Amino acid sequence: MASAVAAPGHQDRYAGLKRHEVILLFVLIAAVAVLAFRSEQFLTTGNLLNQGRLLVEVGLMALPMTFIIITGGIDLSVGSIMGLCAILLGVFWQKLGLPLGAAIALALVVGALAGFVNGWFITRVGVPPLIMTLATLALYRGLAEGISQARSVRGYPDWFFGLGQGELWGVPTQLWLLLFFFVISAIVLTYTTFGRSLYAIGNNEVAARFSGIPVDGIKIAIYTMSGLMAGLAAWVFVSRVSTTRSDMGTGLELDVITAVVLGGTSIFGGTGTILGTALGVVLIQLLKNGLALSGVKGDGTIVVIGVILILSILVSDLLRRQRGAEH
Amino acid sequence: MTSVPPLLRLDGIVKSFPGVRALRGVSFDVRPGEVHALLGENGAGKSTLIKVMSGVHRPDEGRVEVDGRPVDFGSPQEAQAAGIAAIYQELLLFPELSVAENVFMGHAPRLSWGGIDWDQTRARTAEILQSLDIHDLDPDTPVGALSVGNRQRVEIAKALSMNARVLIMDEPTAALTEADVERLFGIVRRLRERGVGIIYISHRLVEIFDLADRVTVLRDGEYVGTHEVRDVTEPQLISMMVGRTIDQLYPHRTANPGKVVLEAKSVAYPGTVEEASLTLRAGEIVGLAGLVGSGRSELAQILFGVTPASAGQILVDGQPVTIRSPADAKRLGIAYVPEDRGTQGLIRPMRIRHNVSLAVLKELARFFFIDRGREQELARRDIERFKIRASSMDQVVGKLSGGNQQKVVLAKWLATRPRILILDEPTRGIDVGAKAEIHKIMSELAAQGMAVLMISSELPEVLGMSDRVLVMREGRIVAGFDRAEATQERIAAAMMRSAQQERAA
């Protein structure tokens, strides 16, 4: 009993500083400092805003991915859903002749539906998330390629590029969108019954079920959200690059998952924050950009990101164990 | 007798696990040719003590001696080599392998080139079985095809094949039928005549008086005393075990049953529950007894919607209801405190505050937003009401002791203000003090008009707490007794197979 006196966060004055997010913030600052030193172009408002523009798609998908990984699941199919939605957006508009607004809305619906299918099979049939979304990673990509017939769609009207290429109050438009969803997700995760249920499921799914929490419904909801956000990312992406191809978003699921895990969400479920994910997304984008500017080739960048990922997990694991030993 | 040096002697054994002192200075010895019973309630430290003897745990302090020489077992293999074998409650056999293969697993007779001498293996297995007066067990039968009683005989044969001189039996009769118990006793007596020292763990007092020469009692990890069995009486042993008499242990309460609130009519779930029926009234505590595997927890989980009934009908307040999930059950005012706290009851990495609110998150929320003030208020009140010993409401539940963890589960469910409370082994593995507190809470709840269904494997608890006792066997409710007519013997007889009870029910 005496050993239980020190509650987490009560005795350790530095507990706040040992949080994963704080460590990540320091890593981010250090990275920015080093990169700014290596390249003059790096630390300029123009470059940073442009990087902000580039990270939005990964950022949008990383938000529901955080939810999913907190419950102990994973969604490997987000890159493919994004590709599918991008192609359908173009096809609905150009081939089926729908108004562009309707085509966008329909593409979002397809994204949500694709996520719902993942969630339905995971909860009702009991397919493990890793296997289910690995299957739909291939399936949705295959559909995208089949539908596109290796042709791209271009020639969108000018207003369509406002989201991906325009600015609002001097900041890339899509960054406002990401900020909006970031705030919503953070509030949902921290303050609502839904957010609390996600942590409960991730820490002990059986006990959550035994407590009357609608585990299956919640899981279906987060996979559906993930699909919807991948659809939204597709819209932003097409608007940014002005064209639609079926290979869009290939491999993006890795960036998304890396950002979430780098942000301190345990791949085993139960812990994680939206703030951490946001820092993870920013750190990865800045590393990619900064290293490219200082002349490091693409392969080298991936190696650096991998090393940072491993280090950050080691450090936070070390701190968690240290904290565990204190009481 | 006393001049014979003990085969195995333990002195001043102390063993701690994180958060618990399982043994605090326990001494014990067993002589050749005696049955020495080890007695104590669940959580008294019996299992830890036998694990120290059999080399599973190393004691933190104290001496272990074999034939008067100090030993330090680093593994069960070392203990076996010293002639100490243990038979645990859950038998550790390979169901796909034959009797002979199981008996000689790991130490089979070898041929000159190193291969296993199968003829020898079979012959020696047959020989050991003969010596135990077991004639109906073929060394070539796969173990998976055997009854529980026969499997246990295989375990005993296995111990003897390693020339065990000390045999530890952990609740060997827990899952046996009456006839198998008789045969087991025969075997134990035969082994005693051969000079084997037998350590016999049980909390069935009748067996101890029947079989044992000496008895040692443990309570809360402490050594209470060792006596010759012929010198003690049953009430004496009970008061040694619990530290007070049964009358003091359970709160007195006059039952005042109201109207029927829950009724199950022939509910079933494939493979576990067959046509079980029961009624539960407001203000009464109904004990549900039965052997492990009789379908008690499964019945509870049907009523709670974890595994919805495949047939039959459930009525709440006389109205037929459909319960397809715990959420449905919760809405109907049913709460279930599960048997397995760690996996079903609690979210151990989360704080007390977050656990007690888990079943009432919706009620605590305004527009999906959890009202943290009300959540803290709930946690504060529960900690006080249930005397949960914790540093604060922010303490992680996994760090609490078993009894306090159970109180958190209870608090979580009582927060839903249920009218029907199902408790599955509510005091298993928790210390005597917390146990008494939980019993007191149960009595208070019943007095306030709650209908309580309590599943328990401890007959004294069933007898002490229940206004009525139902007995389950093979997925059916086979007997029911009022408080006045319920006795340990009658309930036990109904739990086992017994023709007279069948007719009486």
Image (spheres, coloured by chain):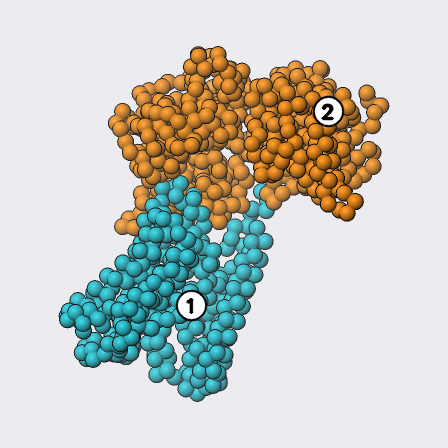
Chain colours: A cyan, B orange
Label 1, residues with CA under 10 Å away: few <14, some 14-19, many ≥20? some
Label 1: which residue?
A254
Residue B494 in percent (x, y) is at 49, 18
- Percent across and percent down for residue B228 are 73, 19
Which residue is depicted at the point 44% across and 87% down?
A40
| In the depicted structure, whether residue A139 falls above or below residue B449 | below
Q: Quadrant of residue B447?
A: top left
Circle 2 or circle 1, nearest the eye = 2
Find the distance from the CA under tag 2 to the CA under tag 1.
66 Å
Q: Farthest right residue?
A: B3
Rendering quarter of residue A224 = bottom left
Q: Name the residue at 83% across, 25% down.
A: B4
Instruction: Residue B62: tell me if it is visible.
Output: no
Instruction: Count residues near mark 2 (Cα–Cα under 10 Å), then give few for <14, some for 14-19, many for 20+.
Output: some
Please give the residue where the numbered disc 2 appears in the rendered image. Answer: B131
Amino acid residing under circle 2: Ser
Picture disc at residue B67: none
Query: Taking B98 as reference, is A139 left or right?
Result: left
Q: Nearer the viewer, residue A177 or A310?
A: A310
Badge 1 amino acid = Leu
